[in-house]
Amino acid sequence: MFFQRKRRTGRAGGARPAPAQARRLYSIHGLPEGRVFTGRFEAPGGSYIWEFTPASAELVGGKLQLTGRLRVRSPRGAERVAEGVRATLASTQGAVGTSPARRELIRSTTQTGNISTPTQKQEQAKAPETTEEPQDPDKPFPSRPFVTEVTGPLAFVGVMYFHFQPLDGRALGVPLDLSRVQLNARLAPVDDTARDLLWLYSDLVAAAYAEKPDSRAAAESPSAINRLLAG
């Protein structure tokens, strides 16, 4: 997270300078815990803990928009809450490393499990091996990179960058300008709900933010996300 003091400006001739404006908070870092993104940031007075709990997801102008509750706890323990806060996905970053298990959600019940549909089984059967063979030094490098667990249809999102709507720092008890805060949400899930949401977010990004968007798949993705958010 970053914040910066704005410079004072004054009139020539020794006139009284304009009042100093609040420092601005530019970005905060968060991790998923179930349906919630949580983290902390430093501000004058100490460390503030925050939670953003999305209640709904929708596509607005082709971009993912999450709406929910933002809770901020001051260093002294006082909590302030803002309802109906909107966060719009601006960009994403692909993940590097072993992908978490993708679970097939059972839509008729609230249970989940490691179940593959017939279509997924066919895709898995056709999927190329991810093990690289030793490179022969006498052969030229391949024209395309090797397929691994984080490329092509096997890729998943590692970080999502959201822009919050302008926030009222005073109402949230934060002595900073919160008019344009970016949420850097690193998708490092440690529970089943967060893992399921990781894949749902990844599917939406693959459909809506691709060079050639899949409008049908993109339109269906928010419904699946909302089912989990409603949990």
Image: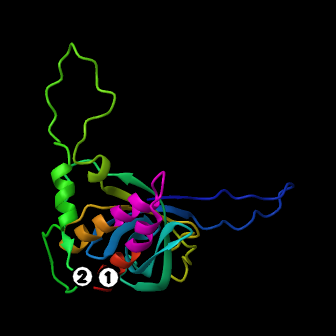
Instruction: Write down the residue under mark 2.
Output: 107
Instruction: Answer whether labels 2 and 1 touch (C-beta < 8 Å).
Output: yes
Between 139 and 91, the one nearer to me in the picture: 139
| Residue at image location 23% in from the left, 16% down from the top | 139
Q: Which residues are magenta?
A: 201-221
x, y percentage for residue 143? 34, 28
Residue 173 appears in the figure: no
Q: Quadrant of residue 70?
A: bottom left
x, y percentage for residue 18? 75, 65
Secondary-structure class at tag 1: helix
x, y percentage for residue 141? 28, 22
Within-10-Å neighbours for mark 1: few <14, some 14–19, many 20+: some
Against 223, is 137 above or below? Answer: above
| Residue at image location 33% in from the left, 57% down from the top | 157
The amino acid beneath tag 1 is Arg
x, y percentage for residue 109? 19, 86
The amino acid beneath tag 2 is Arg
For the residues marked 2 and 1, what is the alpha-carbon distance in whole angstroms?
A: 9 Å
Within-10-Å neighbours for mark 2: few <14, some 14–19, many 20+: few
